[in-house]
Image (spheres, rainbow, N blue to C red):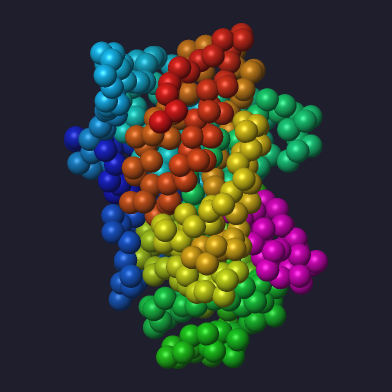
Amino acid sequence: MLLAVLCACGAPVIVPDKPLAVPTATTKVEIPTEIPTVIPTEAPTEIPTEIATNIPTATLTTVVTNTVVPTAVIIPTATAAPVAVVTEWEPRQLTTKLIGSGASFPNPLYQAWISVYTKNVVPGVQLSYSSVGSGQGKKDFIAYLTDFGGTDSAISAGDVTAQAPDAIHLPMVMGGVMPMANIAGIKTSLKFTPETLAGIYLGAITNWNDPRITKDNAGVTFPDLAITPIYRSDSSGTTSIWTDYLSKVSTDWKAKVGSGSAVSFPVGIGASGNAGVAATVLNTNGSVGYVEVGYALAAGFPLPYVKNASGNFVKPETGNVSSAAIGLNISSNPQKLAMSITNSASPDAYPIAAFTYILVRQTTYKDVVKAQALSDFIYWGLTTGQGATVRMGYAPLPEPMRQASMKALKTIVVNGESVLNAPIK
């Protein structure tokens, strides 16, 4: 199955059906259908048969169509003195292999970046990223099984101190986690309050015609249908975001369940990965699951409304997700860029929003070429690659955080020597 993505190059590019390298034996999953280039406002009237009947088990493959990787141009500021020729940054044409694993949250975007970069930008670099969940990705990274990791939740302070003292969390993109509900005959965008979401996952709200749901969805006729909550069975950054939010808005949730990458859910059915949750929801009438926005769009589901801290019902659209990062106090310490932005006080903010991170090592890489190639790829993702974010259901980084991420990237050294010389732009 192929995922259509608009990125930036000139001819179709196809990601191999299998990754170039797999750091663990964990089975990878596939997005159940294509991500549209235009975010729909309503769900389609019917779900394609091939999606509704096929729980994904294969590695995500990606097609990048009609793409052009533009070269950034630096225009010198006008001045009375002679203007020096400015040499623009370009990734180095290196030959090496890089292996990463981790969060499924950014997997569609990372696969698109990898496809374009290795086919059109630096073909000598072999890159693979296995979507095994944030928990496994952190374990692989700490154990030196991978060159980089992907996670939506930070490595714990204790683990950093004891096992990964030079780990840097590089923010790469923002995204929203949304409730994805499958109720036969209802295709409209539903409204959820914090109390409703916590109640459903605590097992206190068990039927779709519960008055606490119907009062917020005037004009929608809910059936007498049991609610089946779907949650992540693997250690997951998406679960970390979801439970961090619920812990902020519900004292009962915080006391009874708490937050983290893996928690004991009181009710429901577990599924592995964002794609696994999306596919299970598709196959279960009356179910609701929490997924990264792109996976719901891929399945043809409408974006829901969630009531934010200011009392406004907002959808997880790009602008609302970005609003969750307004007013952040960004640390100058490159090892302290990971932060929670759920339940933001911004009036327009979508409340279940987060950054997702790439994990790199600041001082313990031994292979100079690998470190250079990895730094170039990540820098490219923070510049040229940001153009693909909105088209895939993500939000680009706010400019202060994007620059902070680039500055942190430039602190990577091998044998005391910096591996990246690139402008902060």
Is residue 263 rendered to the left or right of residue 50?
right
Q: Position of residue 176 (x, y in %)?
A: 50, 57
Q: Position of residue 271 (x, y in %)?
A: 57, 58
Count numbered badges in the picture: 0
Magenta-tinted stretch:
238-265
Q: Quadrant of residue 393?
A: bottom left
Looking at the image, which residue is at 73% across and 41% down? 156
Is residue 141 rendered to the left or right of residue 179?
right
Looking at the image, which residue is at 71% across and 70% down? 250
Looking at the image, which residue is at 71% across and 57% down? 259
Task: Decide: is 246 above or below 67.
Answer: below
Magenta-drawn stretch contains 249: yes
- The one of 105 and 53 positioned closer to us in this rendering: 105
Q: Main secondary structure of the magenta part?
A: helix
Magenta-drawn stretch contains 9: no
Q: Position of residue 334 (x, y in %)?
A: 62, 31
Looking at the image, which residue is at 64% across and 18% down? 363
Q: Is residue 370 visible in this depiction of the protein? A: no
Which quadrant holds the C terminus? top left
Q: Is residue 167 visible in this depiction of the protein? A: yes
Q: Position of residue 275 (x, y in %)?
A: 48, 55
